[in-house]
Image (tube, helix red, strand yellow):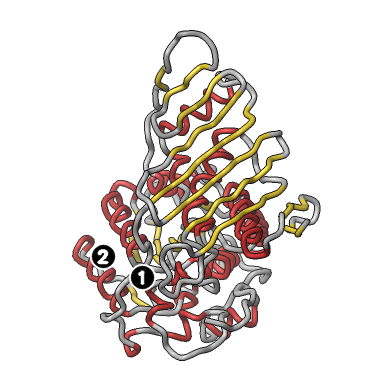
């Protein structure tokens, strides 16, 4: 856990970790996969089939017939998870999918048109860019990446290859948030000057048992990807959220949803600067990331966004957007005006779409998804900036011209 961090999406590390199974990497030309006709079946591969990946697998299986799609391959470095997922697919569809531990093998399958990525966060950048370079459409779990460089490469590749990407920030398909976005855009709360959100749990979140994980069942080299080699460590596999090499902590794990929602509701894109404080105040159990965190981001449109999370109190949370005329409560979905005796009025939600089905629809229509890849880049900037502010103890700023984050 103490080795230096490296760019896991570099060609050398990626090819080495994938065992040479991948024939295409970012920047290498490949023929783009054309749109499928209504009667042509779309092949899907899942990379990472743990808890969240299994949710996606089950969501796809429920609507596979209606959308004329099939799960052709499942990939997980933990063979036990891969075997369970393959059995689920076989039971539901009558067809046994290919199972593998190295995602390069899945990307080489010409029958796979699109992939779902639900791996630990540190692998998102390498896998997404490799998949786009190979001409695959993608559903990428949040955070899209934990570094700005690979997020920028992914955006460029998606444009170059004309790929359809859905980022897993599902609030963009939620009818309440879509109604809230329109209310703010219509000027109902006036010019926004502040957004505020918080989340609280009184538990050692992300701490898991490891007694059921055995080295013989894990493709450890594939899991490490571009990380420095080290002996098998089941904690790093099962509790990757707790460590700096494999996640950027609360900003990527939870703040992503709120930062993306702020962007959606206000129309803002990326913050100009960020500061943060936090630490391990409660759960001194070997974790490397803060269990208590607070960040403030400033946006060039002229508002602040403060976000906090703690694991030492179960008070709940809040999410509010403050304008000069009114406040939008994005938990209770009502608008409270600043002046007068009129009480808060509720927003009428639009119909909520299935985030997964929206992606499946767009695979065939080639229309933009509800959470296109550009929105992923925006939340990456916000969350990486907040994480760096905490790690360095210095205010961070975004240089839009160079697309880099710099310390102030």
Count of marks, rendered view: 2
Residue count near mark 1 (Cα–Cα under 10 Å), binned few <14, some 14–19, many ≥20: many
Q: Residues within 10 Å of mark 2 (few under 14, many from 20)?
A: many
Pinpoint residue 32: horizontal percent, then vertical percent: 58, 60
Note whether residue 97 is visible.
yes
Near-viewer residue (267 or 160): 267
User: Residue 302 placed where, x, y %?
Assistant: 71, 34
Q: Is residue 285 left or right of residue 272?
A: left
Position of residue 82 relative to residue 88, above or below, is: below
Identify the image quadrant of residue 265.
top right
Residue drawn at 47 percent across, 86 percent down:
221
Give me the residue at 62% from left, 49% from top. Answer: 378
Callouts 1 and 2 close, C-beta under 8 Å: yes
Q: Position of residue 109 (x, y in %)?
A: 45, 72
Query: Is residue 140 at least partly visible in the picture?
Result: no
SS type, badge 2: helix
Q: In which quadrant of the rendered image does the C terminus lie? A: bottom right
SS category of the residue bearing label 1: strand
**275, 99: nearer the viewer:** 275
Return the x and y of residue 206 as percentages of the image width and height: 38, 65
Residue under label 2, please give it. 89
Q: Which label sits on residue 74?
A: 1
Marked residue nearer the N-terminal end (1 or 2) = 1
Q: Nearer the viewer, residue 115 or 30?
A: 115
* 62 with respect to 192 (left or right): left
Q: State the mark number for residue 189.
A: none
């Amino acid at each position: 856990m103490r080795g230096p961090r490296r760019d896991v999406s570099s060609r050398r590390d990626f090819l080495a970790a994938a065992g040479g199974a991948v024939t295409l990497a970012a920047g290498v030309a490949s023929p783009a996969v054309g749109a499928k006709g209504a009667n042509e079946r779309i092949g899907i591969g899942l990379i990472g089939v743990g808890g969240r990946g299994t949710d996606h697998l089950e969501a796809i299986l429920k609507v596979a017939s209606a959308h004329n799609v099939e799960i052709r391959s499942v990939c997980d470095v933990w063979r036990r998870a891969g075997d369970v997922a393959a059995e689920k697919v076989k039971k539901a569809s009558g067809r046994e999918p290919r199972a593998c531990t190295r995602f390069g093998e899945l990307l080489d399958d010409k029958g796979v048109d699109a992939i779902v990525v639900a791996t630990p966060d540190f692998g998102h950048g390498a896998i997404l860019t490799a998949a786009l370079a190979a001409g695959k459409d993608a559903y990428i779990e949040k955070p899209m990446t934990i570094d700005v460089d690979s997020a920028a490469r992914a955006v460029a590749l998606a444009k170059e290859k004309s790929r359809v990407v859905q980022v897993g920030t599902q609030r963009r398909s939620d009818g309440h948030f879509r109604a809230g976005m329109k209310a703010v855009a219509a000027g109902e709360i006036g010019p926004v000057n502040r957004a505020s959100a918080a989340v609280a749990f009184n538990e050692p979140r992300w701490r898991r048992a490891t007694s059921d994980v055995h080295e013989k069942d894990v493709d450890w080299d594939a899991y490490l990807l571009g990380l420095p080699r080290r002996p098998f460590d089941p904690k790093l596999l099962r509790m990757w959220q707790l460590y700096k090499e494999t996640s950027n902590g609360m900003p990527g794990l939870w703040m992503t949803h709120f930062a993306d929602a702020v962007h959606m509701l206000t129309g803002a894109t990326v913050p100009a600067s960020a500061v943060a404080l936090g630490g391990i105040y409660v759960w001194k159990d070997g974790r490397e990331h803060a269990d208590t965190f607070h960040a403030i981001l400033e946006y060039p449109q002229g508002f602040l966004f403060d976000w906090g999370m703690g694991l030492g109190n179960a008070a709940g949370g809040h999410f509010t957007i403050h304008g000069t005329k009114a406040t939008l409560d994005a938990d209770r979905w009502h608008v409270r005006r600043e002046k007068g005796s009129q009480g808060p009025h509720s927003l009428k939600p639009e119909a909520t779409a299935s985030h997964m089905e929206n992606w499946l629809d767009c695979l065939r229509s080639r229309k933009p998804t509800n959470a296109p890849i550009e929105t992923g880049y925006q939340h990456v900037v916000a969350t990486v900036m907040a994480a760096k502010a905490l790690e360095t103890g210095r205010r961070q700023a975004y240089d839009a011209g160079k697309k880099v984050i710099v310390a102030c």
